[in-house]
Image (cartoon, helix red, strand yellow):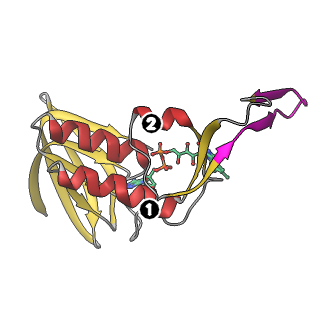
Amino acid sequence: MKSERYDVVVVGAGPAGSVTAKTAAEHGLDVLLIERNQEIGVPVKCAEGVSKDIEKFVVPDKKWVSAVVKGANIYSPDGTKVAMAGNKMEDVGYVLERRIFDKFLACEAARAGADVRVKTEAYGIIKRKGMQKAFMFALGVRIQVYLLMSWLVRMV
Ligand SMILES: Cc1cc2nc3c(=O)[nH]c(=O)nc-3n(C[C@H](O)[C@H](O)[C@H](O)COP(=O)(O)OP(=O)(O)OC[C@H]3O[C@@H](n4cnc5c(N)ncnc54)[C@H](O)[C@@H]3O)c2cc1C
């Protein structure tokens, strides 16, 4: 079985995984970000609406913002209504294009230095004498990754 070494393995290239991988790489760690699907952001399992709080993590870009939301009423199953912005019609959020947004974030992680691999699925982890090993299928090939800092971040 092929062996590799990384400080951190992040399992799942959704928004949480990509931002985590980017942050770890920016701090000088050797990072592997893996995604089991062959295309990041696909299939989309999301209605794609987010609040402006997303700006705490990323600068909105026309490439992956398909609409700006100006006010919204949110109803819970029991009928409770939460009004965002009320009658002021301010920008309160965005409708994303997740298939592009997720790829954008994975690219940001790669730009920060993370290795990004698709069609790679984690299926196990072994912890022995303080050393962790993650097992995965990468393009159908079984590999093991030694985690030098004993970090495996599972984002799923
Ligand atoms: C129907 C629906 C509508 C939604 N609408 C909204 C909405 O309007 N607004 C909103 O903010 N949120 C919405 N959500 C929630 C939103 O989609 C999630 O909160 C968000 O995608 C979570 O991001 P994440 O990075 O944590 O995980 P995910 O986006 O789920 O990413 C996890 C990734 O990990 C991969 N993965 C899983 N297991 C492995 C493995 N063993 N090895 C390798 N890769 C693996 C998966 O393929 C996936 O790509 C909705 C969810 C659903 C289901």
Dominant secondary structure of the residues highlighted in magenta in the image: strand
Image quadrant in which the N terminus is located:
bottom left
* N-term-proximal mark, 1 vs 2: 2
The residue at 54%/66% (across/down) is 43
Q: Residue 73 location, x and y as percent?
A: 80, 36
**Neighbourhood count class around disc 1 (C-alpha, 10 Å): few under 14, some 14–19, many 20 upward:** few
Could you tell me if residue 9 is visible in this image?
Answer: yes
Which residue range is magenta in the image? 69-83
Between 106 and 4, which is closer to the camera in this rendering? 106
In the image, 34 versus 114, the foreground residue is: 114
Q: Is mark 1 within 8 Å of ligand 1?
A: no
Q: Amino acid at mark 1?
A: Lys
The Cα–Cα distance between marks 1 and 2, rounded to whole angstroms, is 15 Å
Question: To which residue does mark 1 refer?
Answer: 63
Q: Residue at x 43, y 51 (%)?
A: 14
Residue occupied by mark 2? 55
Residue 134 percent across, percent down from the top left? 23, 47
- Asked whether 81 falls inside the magenta stretch, the response is yes
